[in-house]
Image (cartoon, grey):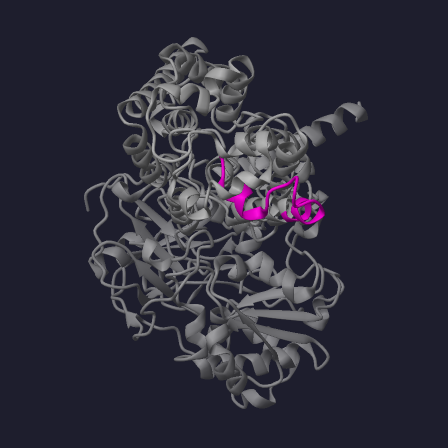
Amino acid sequence: MNRVVLSVAMGPHIHDGSHVYRIMAGYVAALMPAAVWGCVHYGMPAVRTLLLAVGSAVVWEGLARRFLGRDQTIHDGSALVQGLLMGMMLPANTPWWLIIVGTFLMIFIGKQLFGGIGCYPLNPVLIGYAILSVSWPMRLSSHFALVDLTLKGPVLEPLAALKSYGPSVAEVYPPLNLLLGLQTGGIGTGAVGLLALGGIFLMARGDISWRVSLSFLLGVAVAASIFHVISPSRFAGAAFHILAGTTVFGAFFLASDYTTTPVYPLPRLIYGFGTGVLIVLIRNLGAYPDGTVFGILILNLFHPLIDRIRPSVVGGGVLRSGWRGCSPHQVRSSRSPHM
Amino acid sequence: MIRKFFFGFSKPKIRFEGWEGGVETLPLPERVTLPLSQGRQMPFKPVVEVGERVKTGQFIAQLPDRTGVHATVTGIVESIGPGYNREGEEILTLSIHRDSDDEMVPSRPIERLEEAGREELIGVLAELGFASPWKPEELKGRSEGPSIDTVVVLAVDEEPPISVQRRFLTEFGEDLADSIKGIRRMAGEEARIVVAVPEEMKDRAEALLEGVEVLPVGNSPAQTNRALLVSRVVGERVGYVCAPGSNGVVVFSAEDIAFAGRCLRMGKPRTNKLVTVWGPGLQRPKTVKVRLGTPVGHVLSCLGVQVGSGDRVIFGGPLMGYAQPDLDAPITRETDGVTVIPSNEVVPFSDAPCINCGRCVEVCPVFIPVNLVGRYAEFGFFEKAVSMGSGACVECGLCAYVCPSRRPLVQYMRFANKEYIQRQEESAQQEGE
């Protein structure tokens, strides 16, 4: 027999084939319908914004890894997805420099300073967007930013209108129009129906947790309903809060980000629900028209704490003193002496 | 090839596909290699010399309390020296070069097996190479342990595609039922005998076996895991309690005790082993009967399984099996399966960071926060890793199987445990000085 050199390794010797880039490809596929719809709705400026956001995010990622002297991670696709998410939240005619500054803040400060994918404490997309929206509020407020474009549907952002004119504006925005995406806002955040389809696709694939996304929507619905029941003249109902603004986008694509989300079932429910409630609190009682960004960021901070609610390890997980004599693989093969 | 056993999104489910079908007996190998010791246990003392001719069933090595190892083919003793067991630990081995067909040593069947006393059963079993955990009265004083109150018989296989143990509920069911009666006689009336069987065979097992508890077990590797199964039976975690039997629990595989019973009836020592083979070139997993000590290369070439350089030949299943360094590795009593994974299907591990997706946590049967422990171990916080529960790891391999970052999570667990213990010992030594 000719000599065969075998490879030796520890198990498991097989893998289910999942990979980070496959998850990211799922995200891209799920975001595509809404992104394409945004491009149709807003025209070429939207295409420009999306491409610039994606491209600059990937370039920043590459430069950041290089500058920090780490292995290149462009190929995992996380920068691409984050660039796409950032682009979809921006108004269509955001100036080019603002996009590049935004993706820089996202990748450098939000992500790579902490060590890149898996290590950041707060969702980098939201970090980038939050800094932009605090620094250049007029540029990021869609109905100011989009003043040059002619659009179908009301030009005022629904949540801004709600803030200024009270819940009676809900009549101007019929739920069906909101669902179809006839609302002013970020490029890809308006088409609520298409985003929901994308979210369902991701949940079916198991790429995002239904616990986070659905409890997020439930949190918004419950909190908004309570406010609405207490004072219908001051606060809009649950349907409006879910369909207007970035709620659905946040539920499926921002709050579900792995790194900043708990991993256990109950903590995921708490995290999602808490975010939803917080968003409504910010919208109804705070200064900002849309609370999705800050709501998720605040719950991101709490995620390690919430994740401590977990089942205890079987047997307490204590290494007993006899361990050295008998490692698990020996226990597995333990037969009585020589039977 | 392996993936078709699993379906569902995040929880790997397992289906036994096509395990039915008869057991084929393979032709005799040119050479057999027999282990004369097990890991850290005392080695058997060889009673034959290199160059001596042995017959099938002849005593070749012995322990003081009369049990020993038997030749499984007829031929010349070729070497006695160091070898490796499937875990890669150095042990003493003896190899025999076969020079003719079987010449059997005369068998000595027990007449009136049903009436044989406990002492006689134990004694004859030991002579046939089955060291039972029960000691005859004369040896009682020497190794005093707690008396055995629970006997666990595992008629489930650890993971697909292995289908060895479950066959002792179907094709070889009579042998198992017979042997369990013998076990009952040795263990005493008040001992608990628990037989773990696959869920779908529960009714069959209950009809077949008398006077035992039948424990139905699901097909997920998290349920069939040996350590977890035993702890489920005895209601406490025995995984890290050392020698089996030391806490009153003994664990047998169905195959081992069924063979013991059959050998007792026929008065012959055990020479065979059932092995499920699965690899490229086979339509479906195939279970064959081979001589103990057969080199794995012989088994694979008989079945037409192609093995090239860089492939993995695994003793056991694809999740928990032990990759073997060469094709001379012998089939031993622990080898239930041989799985060949071609080099192009081997998925390499990477040092990519954990993305905290939580899939490992979902599949972990002992609820270790794998996402945290993996990171602690990676960055050297061994104390933290152990305090989070890495010590409970049963090495089922499911976490690494589902990890999208392809992190070597099982290795991280072992690493943390080992480093932790080493450091504990070092600091204890320093305090001693």
State left or right for residue A73 relative to residue A209. Answer: left
x, y percent for residue B367: 61, 49
- Observer able to see residue B290: yes
Quarter holding residue A104? top left
Q: Nearer the viewer, residue B292 or A181?
A: A181
State left or right for residue B363 relative to residue B232. Answer: left
x, y percent for residue A38: 33, 33
- Observer able to see residue A12: no
Q: Is residue B221 above or below residue A81?
A: below
Q: Residue at x 47, y 81 (%)?
A: B175
Q: Nearer the viewer, residue A323 or A24?
A: A24
State left or right for residue B211 relative to residue A57. Answer: right
x, y percent for residue A60: 39, 15
Q: Is residue B246 above or below residue B271?
A: above
Look at the image and say whether residue A242 sits in the magenta stretch. yes
Q: Residue at x 50, y 43 (%)?
A: A171
Look at the image and say whether residue B102 sits in the magenta stretch. no
Q: Nearer the viewer, residue A317 or A237?
A: A237
x, y percent for residue B386: 66, 37
Range covered by the magenta-colored residues:
A225-245
Q: Nearer the viewer, residue B147 or B128?
A: B147
Q: Residue at x 32, y 64 (%)?
A: B74
